[in-house]
Amino acid sequence: MDLNSMTDTEILKVANPIMDNLMHASTNNDFDSHTRDFSDRIKQKFTHEEFQKYREEYRTNWGDFTERDFVGLTKNGNTINVYWKQKFSDTDDEFLAVLTLSKKNEQYLVERAFVDLWQLES
């Protein structure tokens, strides 16, 4: 089924397990599991060093990933962007988690995934 013709429920049935794996693998410092659903394009760009740097930043400042609540999605040509409100263990602050998926040969691939950790410095 074409990504753009899928319902929100159908998309979440695909996106939630992928995002669960990303969060779990990051928490467990498992780069190979974290990148298992990445497209070739993102695998070439996202290094183990970047993974470690990002992991260190969020764990030091906010703790581990906890609950995630679906906010919405956007359909853009050959990709779907899924948005969640993301919580961490050591803060009550809320962040935006984003997952961009494509589909190639009946496989759903991560084109982009991040939690927006930007905060205004006081």
Image (spheres, rainbow, N blue to C red):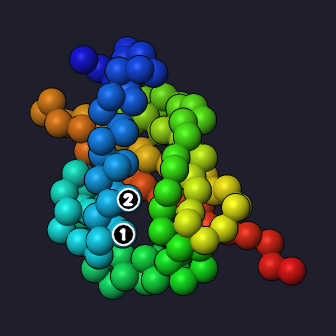
Query: Residue 6 or 97: which is nearer the viewer?
Result: 97
| Residue 10, position as x, y percentages in the image | 35, 21
Taking 21 as reference, is 95 left or right? Answer: right
Give yes or no for contact between labels 1 and 2 (Cβ–Cβ under 8 Å). Answer: yes
Query: Residue 40 or 36: which is nearer the viewer?
Result: 36
The three-letter amino acid code for the residue at tag 1 is: Thr
Outermost residue toward the front in this view:
89
User: What residue sits right under mark 2 in the picture?
Assistant: 23
The three-letter amino acid code for the residue at tag 2 is: Met
* Above or below, comparing residue 113 to residue 15 in the picture: below
Q: Residue at x 52, y 46 (%)?
A: 68
10 Å crowding of disc 2: few (<14), some (14-19), many (20+): some
Q: Residue at x 43, y 77 (%)?
A: 55
Taking 48 as reference, is 73 left or right? Answer: right
| Residue 7, position as x, y percentages in the image | 42, 16
User: What residue sits right under mark 1 in the picture?
Assistant: 27
How many marks on residues?
2
- Between the C-alphas of marks 1 and 2, the distance is 6 Å
| Residue 21, position as x, y percentages in the image | 29, 53
| Residue 20, position as x, y percentages in the image | 34, 49
* Above or below, comparing residue 61 to residue 75 in the picture: below
Query: Residue 69 or 51: which is nearer the viewer?
Result: 69
Q: Residue at x 37, y 15 (%)?
A: 5
Query: Can you see residue 12?
Result: yes
Query: Can you see residue 50?
Result: no
